[in-house]
Image: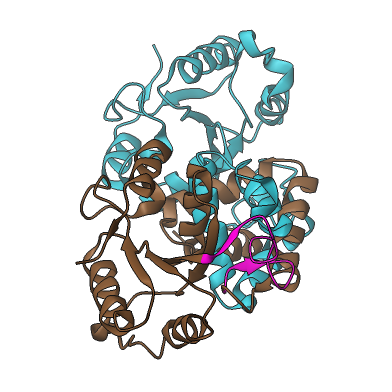
Chain colours: A cyan, B brown
Amino acid sequence: MSPQVIPQALDRLIRDLTKLPGIGKKTASRLALNILRSPVAEARELATALNELHSSIQLCSCCFTFSESDPCTICGDHRRDASLVCVVEQPGDLLAIEKAGNYHGHYHILHGVLSPMDGIGPQEIKVRELEARVNSGTIKEIFIATSSTVPGEATASYLIDRLQDKAILLTRLACGIPMGMDIKYADKHTLARAIETRCKTT
Amino acid sequence: MSPQVIPQALDRLIRDLTKLPGIGKKTASRLALNILRSPVAEARELATALNELHSSIQLCSCCFTFSESDPCTICGDHRRDASLVCVVEQPGDLLAIEKAGNYHGHYHILHGVLSPMDGIGPQEIKVRELEARVNSGTIKEIFIATSSTVPGEATASYLIDRLQDKAILLTRLACGIPMGMDIKYADKHTLARAIETRCKTT
């Protein structure tokens, strides 16, 4: 196919869309052609949402989730238990746990997992910040909810090692999540059960 | 989950993304969180591509494909055979046929298929415009390449009925495409074979 058959603006959108995770060239073409067929207002609206995304969202300086305010709505909510902190890998994991509906503590987002092969050590994720929160003395329980993947388990083990001498209770998400499954994809009932039966680390 | 847990700007992007075909709420959340984690420049680039999409692309006044110029690069290419016109449902079908690499005629995009249940009759798709092109006298062959779905077949039958009294050859894509499959998803070798062995309508 001669390259100029696809209009440049369309080709550019297709290329930009394929940078998204899980979007291949065929899906990107299908999405782009659909956007082109839809009213221009819809494309403009999506563009505006993309443009405003980073400018209106920052990291909460306490738990490091994505938020429009600092502290975020969870850290700033006095009805939630500030002595209980749930440690997750990514903001998407926080949303999954909130959806389960039975957790009323605070959070700490690591923004990654330990992965020495990729050069990600404790310095690259928010471990030092977690330790500082523990040292501040208000936390009674750290509830580790990393995914049950190999790097998630390794990160949990590292956190347990690092925090076990502190005067806090260390707990983990209970069995219930199938091994190797990312917690974002667990159904909310399984996740709720796993939160309910979370157990102390041995 | 209290609604304010998801920042408004993120929630807005997720809602806008779910308007795209095949993107559900979980996929939209995954894409939006990934965009938020990626450098701001990537989101801006995608937003710009979306904003410029409709403004720089119009319909070719001859074949009605999406194009940055009028006539489009195919209609304006004197090396292509203007006496042979391939009729397809959507611009994406044109791209699929161009990819097969063995078609050197012009196109006519219907922008839809007949679907009485959805209120789409011959007036809603570019049938009148196709007839006008045939009546202009330069066309020797109309090659119908609608998908082999029920509405695609119905549209083909309608076109054959309407054009069979004209002094032109009417052909269709040959067998080779599995029944019920949208031609955009056929592999290019199957599609090339179907173009090669296209047959006259009976």
Most foreground residue, B78 or B190: B78
Q: Please determine whether, in this image, residue B148 is positioned above or below residue B175.
A: below
Q: In which quarter of the image is the C terminus of chain A?
A: top left
Residue A2 at what x, y percent from top left? Answer: 65, 46
Report if residue B125 is visible in the image. no
Q: Identify the main secondary structure in magenta.
A: loop
Report if residue A39 is visible in the image. yes
Task: Say if the magenta span includes residue B77.
Answer: yes
For the image, the number of numbered tags is: 0
Please indicate whether residue A64 sits to the left or right of residue B125 in the image.
right
Most foreground residue, B141 or B147: B141
- At x 27% / y 47%, what residue is drawn? B177
Please indicate whether residue A33 sits to the left or right of residue A134 in the image.
left
- At x 52% / y 44%, what residue is drawn? B99
Residue B43 at what x, y percent from top left? Answer: 72, 51
Most foreground residue, A26 or A71: A26
Q: Quadrant of the N terminus of chain A?
A: top right
Picture quadrant where residue A45 is located? bottom right
- At x 57% / y 42%, what residue is drawn? A91
Task: Say if the magenta span includes residue B18.
Answer: no
Q: Please state the extent of the stretch shown in magenta in the rendering.
A: B64-83
Q: Please determine whether, in this image, residue B132 is positioned above or below residue A200.
A: below
Q: Residue furthest bottom?
A: B123
Q: Please determine whether, in this image, residue B155 is positioned above or below residue B186.
A: below
Residue B29 at what x, y percent from top left? Answer: 51, 51
Q: Which residue lies furthest to the front in this view?
A: B167
Picture quadrant where residue B187 is located? top left
